[in-house]
Amino acid sequence: KQEVTQIPAALSVPEGENLVLNCSFTDSAIYNLQWFRQDPGKGLTSLLLIQSSQREQTSGRLNASLDKSSGRSTLYIAASQPGDSATYLCLLTRGGSYIPTFGRGTSLIVHP
Amino acid sequence: NAGVTQTPKFQVLKTGQSMTLQCAQDMNHNSMYWYRQDPGMGLRLIYYSASEGTTDKGEVPNGYNVSRLNKREFSLRLESAAPSQTSVYFCASKDLAEAFFGQGTRLTVV
């Protein structure tokens, strides 16, 4: 069974710091990796999708990378802001019968 | 762009009552999923449907049933609700590369 681990589980930082959130998985076969954001009491907002043929994706201050050989994805948040406070979830998926598998998430607080 | 639509958004049930959570997608996806999210437990798979006419149990299926009515719709039924089923429920569908999620149903069983 595929295991998806997110480290750290929680993070509290001052505004302006550059952050790295980690997502690791046990099976390094061909997968796509999605990053989501979830605000308290809200749904899942898709941030970035890295397909298995790609190494990274960027959206604004967010950059996500995928290293299949080491079974790891990182989400880099540049110049963090209080509005970035949320839980960040990674999701491993691919086509066919594979069931999308979530990590437990990283709870981020950015304080002014 | 509707994507994945879940109804209702909120529901309060009394113990023993039944209800059906509805999910529909308009992206012509074969695969659909129901997850529940609980504090400290992450998102766990309840049931899934790899294609129209098929359904399979996930990690936490007890107390639930599902129906894949057609390619668009995948419903989750609680026959006799219990307080342990208080949770947030998410429906999802998947294409070759990406999963798409509904906005969630917040269910409270009292």
Image: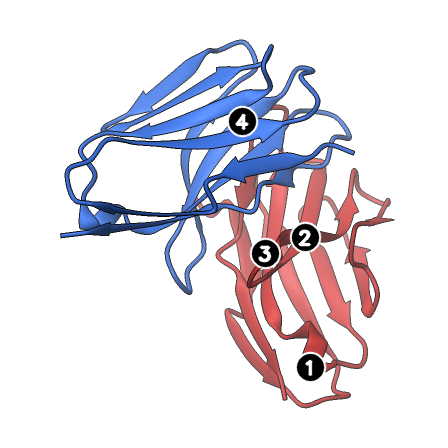
Say which residue label 4 marks. A33
How did the renderer colour the structure? by chain
The residue at which mark 3 appears reads as: B90
Establish if B45 lies above or below B84: above
Residue at the spot 66% in from the left edge and 67% down from the top edge: B21
A69 left or right of B34? left
Say if B83 sits above or below B89 in the image: below
Is A73 left, or right, of B32 in this rendering?
left
Give the distance between the C-alpha atoms of the residues marked 4 and 1, in whole angstroms: 34 Å
The chain carrying label 4 is A
Residue assigned mark 1: B83
Q: Secondary structure at mark 2?
A: strand
Tell me which residue sits at (61%, 46%) in the image. B92
Q: Can you see residue B28?
A: no
Chain A, chosen colour in render: blue
Chain painted red: B
Percent across and percent down for residue B40 are 57, 59
| Disc nearest the viewer among 2 and 3 | 2
